[in-house]
Image: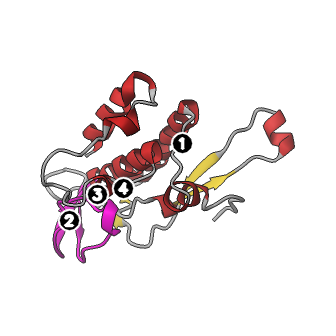
Amino acid sequence: MEYCNDASYLEKKLETRKKEIKNEAKLKAYAIQILEALKATHRSNVIHADMKLPNILMNCPTLDEKQAGETNVLKLCDFGVAQVITPGDFNGKKKALMKERCGSGNYIAPEIKRDGTIVGPEIDMWGFGIVLYEMCVAYKPTQCRRDYKYGQGPIPFRQQDWRKLSKGGSAVQDLILQCL
């Protein structure tokens, strides 16, 4: 794997320091990079199955690279629990049999309930939705309301935390809801 000089940037900024990404251009660029990485992964018939902040690494350009117009680059890592899609299985749909339940607590899709679950790329999109939510407000939906559990009602959006985004965050909230 390539070296990333600020590998845990997102994890430190969002989970440790509780600082959201305020620059909307950066937020959009980071979201696009993560989606491009997932697109390449899914085209290779692989489901990551553990989308979370610690598995998104950052490489920052040197001063010379910045002056040449280079920007931060995000990379997806840790394919240790990835699921391989076998073409032709599951009525031609891009699915895989997850023999053992896996993923990370606050990022795992609600349909992964037990061993032997049939999964598809949508579980990575769920994880991306949680990551994007956290990039916007520096907490996960389950931290917004203590009694909230994924799959039990609509995702909570505390408007006071979203109003700093253009249009009150409605566009990014729509994207998050589509992912979840």
Q: Earlier in the sequence, mark 1 or mark 2?
A: 1
Picture coordinates of residue 176 (x, y %)?
Answer: 32, 40
Rendered residue at 68%/58% (across/down): 6
* Mark carried by residue 112: 2
Question: Which disc is residue 45 wearing?
Answer: 4
- Quarter containing the N terminus: bottom right
The amino acid type found where label 2 is placed reads Ile
Q: Which residue is mark 1?
A: 21
60 left or right, relative to 58: right
- Foreground residue among 76 and 88: 76
Q: Which residue is mark 3?
A: 142
User: Which residue is at 36% across, 55% downward?
Assistant: 45
- Residue plotted at (30% across, 51% down): 126
From the image, state whether disc 4 or disc 2 is nearer to you. Answer: 2
Which callout, 2 or 3, points to the residue nearer the camera? 3
Give the residue at the far top of this rendering.
167
Mark 3 Cα-neighbour bin, 10 Å: few <14, some 14–19, many ≥20: some
Q: Are marks 1 and 2 in contact (CB under 8 Å)?
A: no
Quick one: which residue is furthest to the front in this view? Answer: 160
Residue at x-position 40% and y-position 30%: 163
Q: Quadrant of residue 26?
A: top right
